[in-house]
Amino acid sequence: MVKATQKPDFLHERRAIAAGTCPVAGVDEVGRGPFAGPVTAAAVILDPDNIPPGLADSKKLSAAQRAHLFDIIKASSATAVAHASVAEIDRLNILNASLLAMRRALARLSPAPGLALIDGNRLPERLPYPSQAIVKGDQRVASIAAASIIAKVCRDRLMQDLARQFPGYGWEKNAGYGTKQHIAALKSLGVTPHHRRSFKPIHNILYQEK
C-alpha cells in the first residue's frame, strides 16, 4: 500500500541499472476519463545523476508546479510523447487506446530503453524489451512520475489549442472532462469531432438527436 506521504523515488531504476539493465524508462498516460480529446502518453529516461527535485504524481501538483517541472525534465532527460486519437479510442476502447499511446511513446524514445516501467496493471503488447507494470507507479517511481508530468502538460496544452478552435466547452480549464460547463455546452452547442462517441454521455446525446 502506498502511504499518502510517500514520494516517488529512484530505487526501481537504480536496482535495474545495478543489474546491468539500462537505460530505464518510466511511462504514464493521461486522459482516460475526459469526454473529448486524445489520450496522451509519455516516456521518460531520467539522468541518474540529475534527478529533478520535487517529482510527484502530476495530479498532486498545481499547474504552475507541473509547468516548472516540465521544463526541468525536458532539459535534463530523454522524453517522448504520443497520442491515441479519438477515432482510435472509439474503435479500440479507452484501455487499449491508452496502451497504444504508451507503446508509441516508447517507440519514439531515444535512446531505446533496456527496461520500461509502466504505470498501472497492464502492459502494452509487443514491446521489444522487458517491461514491468507498477500499480500507482506515478506515486512510487520517479521516472513514472516524470512521465505523468510530461504527459499531463502536453495534453493540457493540446486541449487549450482545441479550446480556441471550439470555444464554449471550457476545454482550456477542464481538459475535456465532463464538468457542468462542458455538459451544458454539449447540450447547447452539440458534439464536436473531438468528442468520444463511444463514451455514454456523448453517445446518449447523439442518440437523442437522432
Image (cartoon, rainbow, N blue to C red):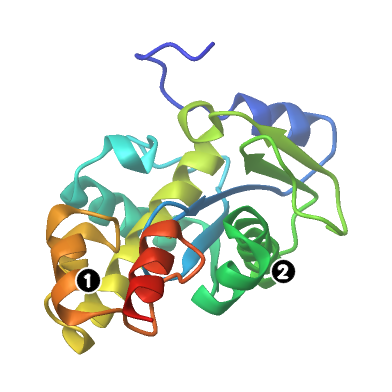
Foreground of the two, 121 or 75: 121
Q: Secondary structure at mark 2?
A: helix
Among the 4 quarters of the image, the one containing residue 55: top left
Q: Is residue 108 above or below residue 130?
A: below
Q: Does residue 49 appear in this view?
A: no
User: For residue 107, which numbered disc appears in the image?
Assistant: 2
Foreground of the two, 1 or 78: 1
User: For residue 128, which numbered disc appears in the image?
Assistant: none
Name the quarter where the N terminus is drawn: top right
In the picture of the structure, the residue carrying the numbered disc 1 is 186
Q: Secondary structure at mark 1?
A: helix
Question: Relative to 120, is 207 on the left or the right?
Answer: left
Q: Which amino acid, mark 1? A: Leu
Among the 4 quarters of the image, the one containing residue 13: top right
Residue 154 on image: x %, y %: 37, 66
Q: Does residue 133 appear in this view?
A: yes
Question: Relative to 153, is 132 on the left or the right?
Answer: right
Q: Dot 1, crowdedness within 10 Å: few (<14), some or many (≥20)?
A: some
Q: Which amino acid, mark 2? A: Ala
Residue at 54% across, 42% down: 144
Tell which circle, 2 or 1, labels the residue nearer the N-terminal end.
2
